[in-house]
Amino acid sequence: MLRPVHALVLSCLALTPLAGAALGAQASSEKSDDAAKKAADDAAKKAALAEAISVCDRGASVPLDPEAKAPPVQYGALFPQDFDLSKLKALADKCQTAMLGAPQEKRLTLEWLRVQVALNQAGLTFLLPQIKLIADGGSPEANYLLYEIYSVHRHDSADAGPPPVSRGMALDALQKAGAAGHLTALETLLRQYMDGPLLRRDAHKVVETAQRVIDAPAQGQSSGEWDSQFRAAMPLLIARTTLTEDGFTSDEQQKAFHAVETDSQAGTNSSGSALAYIKALRFGRGTQQDAAKARQLLEARVANDQYAIPMLADMLAKGEGGPADGKRAIAMLRAATKTVAEAGPMLAGLLLDGKFVGRQPREAIRLLNASWNLDAGIRLAKLLPDYDGFQIDNPDQLVERLSDAAEAGEPGAALALARLQLSDDQRFKNEGVARAMLKPLADAGDRDALWLYASTQYANLDSTSYRPSRRDDGLSDDQLKALIDEGEAKKEQQAYLLQAKLLRKGVVYPQDDQKATAMLINAANLGSVEAMVLLGDAYDDGLGVDKNPRERLHAWREAARLGSLKAKSKLANAFTFDSFDHLMTLREGITDRIALYNDGIGRMGVGVFGANDADMELSGLFSGPASSAGTVAIAAAVMDAFREAPAGLDDQNLVGIGKALPDEIRVAIETTLKSEGFYTGEPKGYFGPDARKALAAWVDAKGPLDDAPSPQAAAGTQQAATAPGDLDADLVNRIRDKVFAQAQAAKTDKQKLAAIKQLGILARYGDLPSRWVLVRNYHQARAIRSVVTPDEITRYALDILVSKPEGVEKPEFEFIFDLTQIAQDRKSKAVGSATLQAIRDDPRLQDPLTLGAIMGQFAFAPDACDSVLAAAKKSGVDGVGSEGCDEDTRTALIAFAKGKGASGVDAAARKAAAEEIKALDAQAAK
């Protein structure tokens, strides 16, 4: 049994020498194989490295690199056209392989670095030392990469820490790259000089940089298509910039015009050259001005060139080269806002102007916010403080863009952003940053910035809830006082306004309401809108001055006329409490109030109350003082609100307002729309879809509401509007003082009669004090009635009632007494004819609210309303009611007066009286 095993062992032993020999032979063979394999591996690695170097060179060759082995690849060309970044990652891997495999080939390091920057992956900051080192060695590409890193990473959140490359370092590096002739850097500089915001926009820098592109050295072994096209575009860019931007000499413009004219004649059909040529014709730059031809060329081009739309729209809106057509301009711009960058800001300007359609600030804000145009951003920043309830997309982007522009020194950017950050809008409020931005401007001599900086030295200075507190930095109290003294010596409105605020709060100066209000008056007289609003508040509350509703309205009205929405809101809110004084108009109380609602001003919260928003906001608006005007007039005022603010025609808004309107007003609106051909349904006040569409069509047909006439002009005497050859005020005052003295001293009937006759002369001229003396005493002085006729006293009383002069108490009662006396004298017929003449001669009486309140007094006097009705019928007034004082008759009288125009009775009387006053003055001088 053991044998086989032994034999096996033996066999094994016997075979051992033979096996060793075999193994030796095998080892020798393996060594040969390893060498071959190593050689093959080395060859493969060498081939792979060569391939990686070739791929990296072809895909990422650096412009202006003297060691480059392939045509240059501009930075933008690194990115695949299909934006498949896996291809860029594959290129990065190849470049890394090449760089590590061939460290002696220094160019490969920068090629790999630029691809890594393009990939923008985590850990990029660890590569910065290498890039900075190469940049310090003079590499244009490395300098450009520093800018590119800043450009990408400046948008990182604050949590990411400070940017890896500072703004100053980035822009310095960009300029160095551009100075070396790096085309991508020069292209970036061109964009910044044209559009900002990192560099201040500068047309001359655009021309200079474009010339540097032309003169730039070759970027590498061969120029490439982009290189050639970019350089070839520069001469025309220079010409277009010279023609379309301000600040170039006539010789430069003539040369530029010849260039674009030649290009146009060559048939290239280049939009830029053609539009530059047309703009030159429009403004007469480098050629003779011919706006009509420019407009004709634009009309021929606009169908096939959308970039011609903004210029044509601008000419249409301004009426250049042909008749104005603002509505067409707006329609063209609306259609182009998504494809033509200039269209949105230009449309926003027309919507804010309100010349062709009612102002639409909310749409304008959306358009401005959607634009990357820097001027649009600056204008948006100026608008937003008044519309802080309106949400915009990406407010942080606006702040960043304006911050960049402010740091670049872009005119207007820093002030616009600072004002926005100092406003009450919590999305932007940042007083510390705003003050830091204002200080260098103030130090450089910008007075507006200085006053804004000074006015925020005390926090909460405008607060009604918190006491002002002094900031640690900035101006001392003594410096504030010195600045205010200097400003007041220069008649700067900001100086008086700031002193008023400090006096009101009792900081820097002792608290003094009287002096504070006096300073507000000074500031308002110098044109400060904010001071006007605060002055109206002072008259409203009696702060340092007697309460005075007339002066309150005067201040707010002037501020509103100059664009203050806060003042307009205050006026609208004051209307509700104007039941007794009747100092306000339907335009202020109804039209403007609904227009403000349409634009979202002062809403307690859009959508908070759902469908009841309007009901909550407008409750009580249509009763109280408005009721004097009558339903038709109120309905007209409501309709006018949509001409003033068409944004309210949005169906959701309009449905809400419709529900807030009383039934009779909805019926009146539908009746008007039906009578004017916009509505075919029955006027039942349902205010359904057809009625709402009809209102929108009516608004479009009527156009924007004209600006309200100045209430101050309207509140003066009639002579302000109608008398040719007005007398000097001092002369009239001198004669009046003498006549009043004579009347006081008169003892005999003859002396009294002479004084009354002279008062009559002054009254016929339009002197309100004289008219009031006669009106107040007419019913109780037979002598006055023997000189002054019933029609004269009627006109004088109407003038007093509508003018509401200071010191006149309860004129409506005196008028009723006078009308009663006239009825007793059986002369009421004169009242009606005089009233009709006065309505025609005095536009103030053509306001439904004013006329309604005044004629409401007629009802208390016998025969007065009947006499008006009789006079209206005799004069052929259409549409009168059954009573002389009812709403139908008042509406008919106003329409008649507007249609017929002035009667001339008052003007003729005043012209004759002026000659008599001159004679009295001449006689007194003897």
Image (spheres, rainbow, N blue to C red):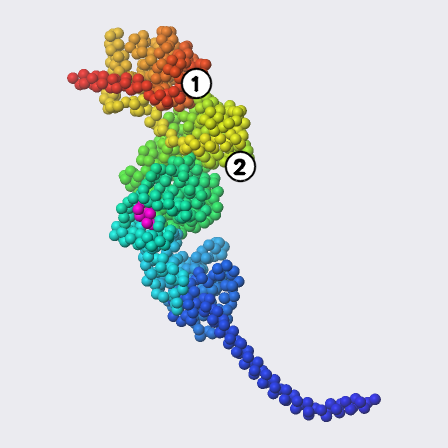
Residue 879 is labelled as: 1
- 483 above or below 781? below
Instruction: Choose between 549 and 15: the one closer to the eye.
Output: 15
Instruction: Choose between 48 and 873: the one closer to the eye.
Output: 873
Residue found at the very far right of the displayed protein: 1
Residue 89 percent location from the top left of the image? 51, 64
Residue 33 percent location from the top left of the image? 59, 83
Q: Residue at x 40, y 31 (%)?
A: 705
**Quarter of the view holding residue 686:** top right
925 lies left or right of 597: left
The N terminus appears in which quarter of the rendering?
Answer: bottom right
Q: Can you see residue 440?
A: no
- Amino acid under label 2? Gly
Residue 644 percent location from the top left of the image? 43, 33
- Amino acid under label 1? Gly
CA distance for labels 1 and 2? 43 Å
Callout 1: 10 Å neighbours few (<14), some, many (20+)? some
Q: Residue at x 36, y 27 (%)?
A: 711
Q: Which residues are magenta?
A: 276-282
Residue 606 percent location from the top left of the image? 51, 37
Which-is-in-front pick, marks 1 and 2? 1
Q: Which residue is mark 2?
A: 607
Query: Upstream in the sequence, badge 1 or badge 2?
Result: 2
Callout 2: 10 Å neighbours few (<14), some, many (20+)? few
- Magenta stretch holds residue 713: no
